[in-house]
Image (cartoon, helix red, strand yellow):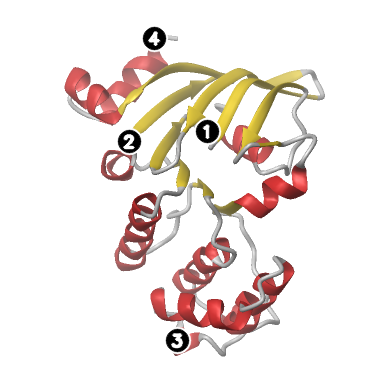
Amino acid sequence: MIEVDGLTKVFPGPVTAVDGVSFRADRGEVFGLLGANGAGKTTTLRMLVTLLAPDGGTARVNGHDVVREPEAVRRSIGFLSVTTGLYERLTARELLVSFGQLQGLPDARARAERLIERFGIGPFADQRCGRLSTGMKQKVSIARSLVHDPPVLVLDEPTVGLDVLVAQTFLQAVEEARDEGRCVVYSTHIMSEVERLCDRVAIIHEGRIRHAASTAELVAEHGSVEAAFIARVTAC
């Protein structure tokens, strides 16, 4: 579902933020991309979702090239990050319906209602997004990322700022997405989430993939994903 080969991004300076990154994430899998702040993971994800153009290498999402077929890539993905914003003047219900219509869904209203029920948005569905709490906003953002039923989800630190109950709801949604056969790329600093969700992980440091393995292999070798992460990064 996602194929990345030699992906590179250089910012003015020059600063090589991503340096020849390669990996593959498959259908029905949660693939973890782990790295410290500034390691290059968010830049990598932003190239995958067509928010940044790569300076080298290739990436394909659901069979579509991120440079040559950006619109097809966007139709294939649901993207969520800690910086994802909402239109504050729209209600939660209006926002979900609007995004469904933008994606060309003939049943946008019905789809929005199903997601409102699934994520417990009903009690505040008709409140403007600007008046919602952080947890409420994140529920709406999660629903928005799924409104067009995308085969691929790209999630960048999605549980930052969430309380325990809302975070649990979100993690369950990720597990359901995997069980439904979606491809999920998941980036987080919370290693307990990685051990719970991720089938495989890649550790990125200073713009390069330093190690890739199954979560089970990392835990078996180091006792935990956190220990494996520290060992690989400090060895660089």
Q: Nearer the viewer, mark 3 or mark 2?
A: 2
Q: Quadrant of residue 34?
A: top left
Disc 3 residue type (three-letter): Gly
Closer to the N terminus: mark 4 or mark 2? 2
Q: Relative to 86, does residue 177 appear above or below in the rendering? A: above
Expressed as whole percent of the image width and height from the top left, the position of residue 36 reads 47, 30
Label 1 – label 4 distance at C-alpha: 17 Å
Q: Is residue 113 left or right of residue 198?
A: right
Q: Nearer the viewer, mark 3 or mark 1?
A: 3
The residue singled out by tag 1 in the image is 37
Which residue appears at 60% of the width and 51% of the height? Answer: 77
Describe the element under mark 1 as helix, strand or loop. loop
Closer to the N terminus: mark 1 or mark 4? 1
Which residue appears at 39% of the width and 29% of the height? Answer: 201
Q: Is residue 197 left or right of residue 84?
A: left
Label 4 – label 3 distance at C-alpha: 49 Å
Disc 1 residue type (three-letter): Asn
Disc 4 residue type (three-letter): Ala
The residue singled out by tag 3 in the image is 122
Q: Which mark is residue 235?
A: 4
> Is residue 62 among what the camera can see?
yes
Expressed as whole percent of the image width and height from the top left, the position of residue 212 reads 40, 20
Q: Which mark is residue 199?
A: 2
